[in-house]
Amino acid sequence: MMEKKISKIELKKIYKTMLRIRICEESLVPYILNSEIKCPVHLCSGQEAVAAGVCAAITSKDNIFGNHRSHGHFLAQGGKIKDLIAEIFGKESGCSRGRGGSMHICDPSVGMLGSAPIVAGTISLAVGCALASKIRKTNNVTISFFGDGATGEGVLYESLNFASLKKLPVIFACENNLYSTHLSIKECRARNNIFEIGKHFGIPGFRIDGNDVLKVYAAAKKAVNFCKNGQGPVFLEFMTYRLRGHVGADDNVQGVHTDIRPLNEIKKWKKKDPIKKFERYLLENNIFKKIDFEMIENEVITEVNDAYIFTRESSFPKASELNKYVFKS
Amino acid sequence: MSSKVRKLQYSLAINEAFHQMMACDKSVFLIGQGVKSPWYVGKTALGLLKKFGPERIIDTPVSENAITGAAVGAAIAGMRPIVVHPRMDFMMYAMDPIINEAANWHYMNGGRGTAPVVIWGVINRGGEQGAQHSQSMHALFAHIPGLKVVMPSNSYDAKGLMVSAIKDDNPVVYIDDRWLYNIEGEVPEELYSVPIGKGIIRKSGKDITLVSVSYLVLETLKAAEILEKEGIKAEVIDLRSVKPIDKDMLEKSVKKTGRLLIIDGGWKTCGLAAEISATIAESALFKDLKSPIYRLALPDIPAPSSCTLEKEYYIDCNKIINKVKKIFE
């Protein structure tokens, strides 16, 4: 069994990452609702296992690129909660100095090179990053995180072909949360076969339960090894579900009801909550005790609370510095 | 200067910039269609593949979006790529990585990342090539914050501006005109650079300022020589950089001459000539003008095919002379 090879320390790290993401995301909700947070925020609650599992399989020397829903990727790759929250609140101390907001978060020091809300916009960038690794012979892997909606963009197919042609060390990590903004992916795609997209370009593809962090980790680890052996890219489709709407706090319970997803579908997926699923696994296998969860949760809550203190104490960017960073001088 | 100066064709001057920059900086690489071909990109890629190998001289499928994105991504990862579009019309497929990603990257990440990529587009006007093989889109790119745009008119600048573009820490759009490729000019053997954002006075005069860029500088100079014989002493400014524009040089010249004609190989509406015109009109020089500011730009018409229509469409020396004479009537 793949899981047995993972040490308790690693399991704890993965669990903590998932919890950091969830608690951080949910902490934003009241501020989205009272408009203290002004920038558009795309929460990833429910999708934590993908970010946590994939990023556990790589190091900070590897690189990731994200999208509009990338708080999880940022945190899983080692970004600090305070840098993220300060950015979302538009503070100078944020990871992008208040110039990016929730949709443009980065921390190059840990390999999180950037994120962008132009759906599929960073896929080719990730391919280029992998090309850079190949030219420099660094043997680093690049992860491109994108959603199921991005499979509608042509650049994905150009990128798959080029990455395969040049055997680039890039993993196409598609988080299929079943919706392209508001629209069911069934209404977007002629066939339900995202994981097979790469096959026509000679790229192996796999569909994985994206709410089972150990399965995500195992698949990512295998893909990373494949890339590092010089065998070229891998396509991974992670089946998952966002517990909130496309943007904002909307979950059909709070705020405006813009989320048109059927309530029974949401209920069904809440039962598959990746964090609860992982907790059950850790308890049933006697790896963690209840007290372990409490300790980790307390650590995370402290980190999030500290992040809010840091954000409140931080200043907004100065109006006089509006034009700072247009060019690097 | 101790360096040997000799005559070199424009395309070979670009080629020399590549040879020298690639030899001294391992992060520089060339990617795009035709770089392996002896004719596709003129002589600009001569000898590069043999000297630097296929890892750094990368010929590609026709996938402008992904290939440009890959160049941008490699730049974000610390490389200094040059991505070539042998016909800049095809660059329209790559607007997303150029405008949404490369141009914004440094700003939206608060200076924590940058995309030092050269996006090189070749204009292939004339020859009855029609609407989609003839377009000069410099104004389009100059409109975008975060992009620099250069358009060298001779061999010396072709090399010097390419060197500057590669060394620049920001994305630079380098646009040249195929009509210049075989024209010889003096080029020092040594590695040198021409500063981005600085124009040059090609001919001094006191009666009227003629501003031009790229190929039309040659036609403007021819016109100025003929006009001089007829008693009109024109000052010819070669902008060299479309963005940033050398405002100081323009203002000094117009202050001296009191008249301004802008000659632009792009379309008239919202074009480079409109921008220069507005820059002078809203400056303190307005009161010094002895006549209105005039534009000689391409009409707002797609490039035609038939040679009789082409003759009517494109600007040449005679059209410039006629326009200047009208100003003095």
Image (tube, coloured by chain):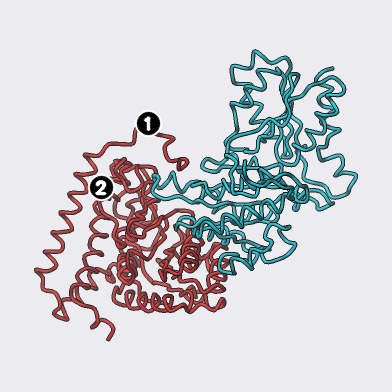
Chain colours: A red, B cyan
Q: Is residue A323 above or below residue B258?
A: below
User: Mark 1 packing: few (<14 Cα in 10 Å), some, or many (20+)?
Assistant: few
Q: In the shown orientation, is residue B220 left or right of residue B195?
A: right
A260, A284: nearer the viewer: A284
- The residue most toward the left is A291
- The quarter of the picture where the N terminus of chain B appears is top right
Q: Residue at x 69, y 16 (%)?
A: B289
Q: Which residue is mark 2?
A: A30
Q: Is residue B124 above or below residue A10?
A: above
Q: Residue at x 83, y 37 (%)?
A: B316
- Mark 1–mark 2 distance (CA, rounded to whole Å): 27 Å
Residue A254's spot in the image, x, y percent?
A: 29, 51
Q: In the shown orientation, is residue B2 left or right of residue B130?
A: left
- Disc 2 sits on a residue from what chain? A
* Numbered-mark total: 2
Identify the amino acid type marked 1: Ala
A100, A60: nearer the viewer: A60
Q: Quadrant of residue B65?
A: bottom right
Q: Quadrant of residue B195?
A: top right
Where disc 2 sits, the SS reads helix
B239, A28: nearer the viewer: B239
Identify the amino acid type marked 2: Pro
Q: Which residue is mark 1?
A: A319
